[in-house]
Image: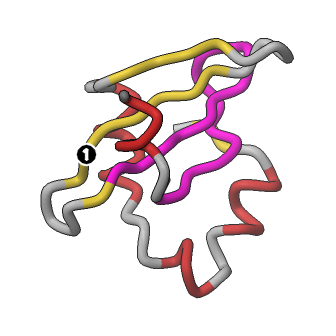
Amino acid sequence: MKTTKYFNYTRKRADRAKIKIEWVEYVISNPEKSEIQSDGRIRKWAIIPEVNKYLRVIILEDGETVHNAFFDRNYKENKK
């Protein structure tokens, strides 16, 4: 899995260190929802059953480099 320096840096934060690489790969392969941002980056969401939270993964325009991943507390509200 290709990643940006930003992704590698933020993974050191306490709230991001708990996010498993397997979960990021799962969201990329099995998104519940995908959107293309105005800057061309791709947002993908999927539920992670182990923690019962939605993980949002941001991928660069190339479609394969992970730029960011975090638990999206507002995703359920956005679905309405």
Looking at the rendering, which quadrant does residue 15 occupy?
bottom right
Q: How far across and down, in percent of the image, does residue 27 sit?
A: 35, 36
Q: Which secondary structure dominates the residues rendered in magenta?
A: strand
Q: Amino acid at mark 1?
A: Ile
Q: How many numbered badges does the structure rendering display?
A: 1
The verdict on residue 63 being magenta is yes
- Front-most of 61 and 2? 61
Asked if residue 6 lies left or right of residue 21, the reply is right
Q: How far across and down, in percent of the image, does residue 79 sit?
A: 38, 29
Identify which residue is drawn at 72% across, 18% down.
37
- Compared with 73, 16 (above or below) is below
Asked if residue 44 lies left or right of residue 5, the reply is left
* Element marked by disc 1: strand
Q: Residue furthest front?
A: 80
Identify which residue is drawn at 65% across, 31% down.
65
The span shown in magenta is: 54-71
The verdict on residue 64 being magenta is yes
Looking at the rendering, which quadrant does residue 2 occupy?
top right
Looking at the rendering, which quadrant does residue 33 occupy?
top left
- Front-most of 2 and 27? 27
Asked if residue 22 lies left or right of residue 4, the reply is left
Crowding around mark 1 (Cα neighbors within 10 Å: few <14, some 14 to 19, many 20+) is many
- Compared with 36, 18 (above or below) is below
Identify which residue is drawn at 58% across, 23% down.
64
Q: How far across and down, in percent of the image, does residue 58 sit?
A: 62, 35
Q: Find disc 1 in the rendering and name its residue.
A: 47
Identify which residue is drawn at 74% across, 15% down.
61
